[in-house]
Image (spheres, rainbow, N blue to C red):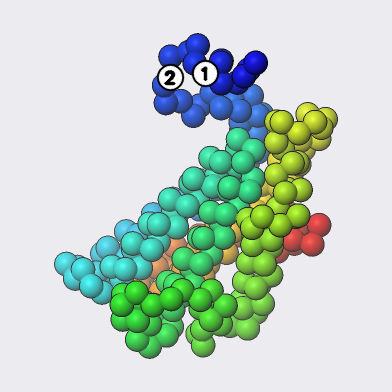
């Protein structure tokens, strides 16, 4: 009578995420091989930023560099988790983590752009995304882009009709042509690498506000180079209206 529950009861329970939606994940890996290479390059550059901050922080554990490292590492975890979830078709869950990563970006930017914000944040202040993304040091073009991206991510991650529609595009329990499901998944992957690009550009620009050295310039140059390369692959800003 309880088909799924009875199947679980008859098996030896073990922790295993690989077998979940394995067929879809393998197809995703094959179809998005080039895009996944860009994701891993962005991922490596995120760790280069961590290394840069560590080199400039010394032993000071209450500094702006130290807390930037921690928030950056939090965002890195979000991106790698979002990537894994997206590859299995958990689009809404992946986008929820991307939204959180963009909020992390704004916190980092305010560490560097807004006087006394670090002290305020450490005291446990309320996080207000709209206020954070409008910090004085953020250019108007970036503010407009952040607003557009954030509204798109919120529209999917919250339980709104658009979010439910996004979920049904790839959900295995919803009747739909399998090829259509796969096409939707592969075509939409721009949101993950696009968000990573936006995040890294924002972080490195914030750090550049107070810090300048050769390693930072090399990281910034590589981020911009990769961002220009992924343009034809579908960047996040070009596709939000589709």
Which residue reaches farthest left? 59
Work out whether residue 161 or residue 54 is closer to the camera in this orientation and state it: 161
Res. 13 mark: 2
Q: Residue at x 31, y 75 (%)?
A: 122
Residue count near mark 2 (Cα–Cα under 10 Å), binned few <14, some 14–19, many ≥20: few
Query: Is 59 on the left or on the right of 98, as rendered?
Result: left
- Residue 143 is labelled as none
Q: Where residue 161 appears, x then y in whole percent? A: 76, 55
State the SS at label 2: loop
* Lateral position of residue 33 relative to residue 132, left or right: right
- Image spot of residue 232 (x, y percent): 73, 54
> Residue 106, how many percent across, how many down?
49, 72
Please report contact status of discs 1 and 2: CB closer than 8 Å, yes or no.
Answer: yes
In terms of depth relative to the viewer, which is nearer, 49 or 219?
49
Return the residue nearer the eye: 77 or 41: 77
At x 69% / y 61%, what residue is drawn? 155
Q: How many marks?
A: 2
Which quarter of the rendering shows the N terminus?
top right
Give the SS element for disc 1: helix
Q: Residue at x 40, y 61 (%)?
A: 72
Compared with 229, 28 (above or below) is above
Q: For residue 144, what is the image quadrant?
A: bottom right
Q: Which mark is residue 8?
A: 1
> Quarter of the image containing the C terminus?
bottom right
First along the sequence among labels 1 and 2: 1
């Amino acid at each position: 009578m309880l088909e799924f529950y009875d199947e679980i009861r008859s098996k030896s329970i073990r922790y295993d995420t690989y077998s979940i939606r394995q067929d879809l994940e393998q197809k995703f890996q094959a179809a998005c091989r080039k895009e996944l290479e860009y994701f891993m390059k962005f991922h490596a550059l995120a760790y280069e930023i961590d290394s840069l901050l560590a080199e400039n922080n010394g032993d000071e554990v209450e500094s702006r560099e130290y807390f930037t490292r921690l928030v950056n590492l939090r965002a890195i975890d979000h991106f790698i988790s979002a990537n894994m979830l997206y590859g299995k078709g958990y689009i809404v869950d992946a986008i929820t983590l991307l939204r959180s990563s963009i909020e992390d970006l704004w916190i980092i930017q305010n560490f560097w752009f807004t006087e006394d914000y670090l002290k305020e944040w450490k005291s446990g202040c309320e996080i207000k995304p709209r206020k954070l993304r409008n910090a004085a040091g953020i250019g108007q073009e970036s503010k407009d882009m952040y607003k557009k991206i954030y509204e798109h991510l919120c529209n999917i991650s919250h339980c709104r009709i658009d979010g439910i529609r996004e979920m049904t595009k790839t959900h295995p329990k919803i009747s739909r042509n399998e090829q259509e499901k796969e096409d939707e998944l592969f075509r939409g992957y721009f949101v993950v690498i696009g968000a990573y690009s936006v995040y890294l550009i924002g972080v490195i620009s914030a750090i550049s506000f107070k810090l300048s050295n050769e390693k930072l310039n090399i990281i910034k140059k590589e981020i911009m180079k990769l961002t220009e390369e992924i343009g034809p692959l579908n960047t996040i800003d070009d596709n939000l209206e589709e």
